[in-house]
Image (cartoon, helix red, strand yellow):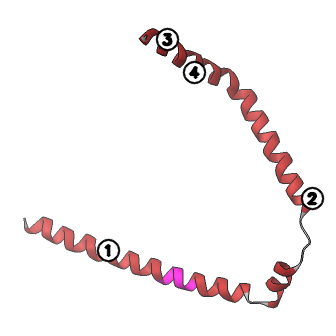
Amino acid sequence: MKFFKRYIEITTAISDRAYLSFLHLLARLRSTTKSLLESKFSRKLLESEEGDVPGWVLVVLMTTGLVTAIWTIAAPRLTAILRNSLDSMNGIR
C-alpha cells in the first residue's frame, strides 16, 4: 500500500512540474509572439495587401499532384475494400 501511495505522490509531483514547465513555456512563447507582432516589420507585412500568389499556386498544384498520384495508386485497393464491404452487407439481409 505504501508503494502505491508513494508512486501516486511521485507521479503527481512529476505531472505538476511538467504542467508548470508547460505554462512557463506558453508564457514565454506568448511574450515572444507579442513582441514579434508589434515589430515594425511584421506590422508592415500585416498591413500590406500584397499576396504571395505564385506560392499559393505552387501549393495548390503540388497538392493536386500528390492527391492524384496517391489516388492512382490506392484506387484499386479502395475499390476492392468498398466492394467487399458492400458484398458482406448484402449477405446480412
- Foreground label between 2 and 1: 2
Q: Earlier in the sequence, mark 4 or mark 1?
A: 1
Q: Which mark is residue 31?
A: none
Stretch in magenta: 24-28
Q: Earlier in the sequence, mark 4 or mark 2?
A: 2
> Residue flagged by tag 1: what amino acid is it?
Ile
Q: Is residue 80 left or right of residue 38?
A: left
Q: Earlier in the sequence, mark 2 or mark 1?
A: 1
- Foreground label between 3 and 4: 3
> Residue flagged by tag 3: what amino acid is it?
Asn
Q: Which mark is residue 90?
A: 3
> Residue flagged by tag 2: what amino acid is it?
Pro
Residue 25 belongs to magenta span: yes
Q: Earlier in the sequence, mark 3 or mark 2?
A: 2
Residue 79 belongs to magenta span: no
According to the image, label 4 marks what residue?
81
Marks 2/1: CA–CA distance: 48 Å
Marks 4/1: CA–CA distance: 46 Å
According to the image, label 2 marks what residue?
54
- Foreground label between 3 and 2: 3
What secondary structure is found at the residue carrying circle 3? helix
Label the magenta part by its dominant secondary structure: helix
According to the image, label 1 marks what residue?
14
Q: Locate residue 77, reporting x and y percent.
A: 63, 22
Q: Earlier in the sequence, mark 3 or mark 1?
A: 1
Q: Are marks 4 and 2 in contact (CB under 8 Å)?
A: no
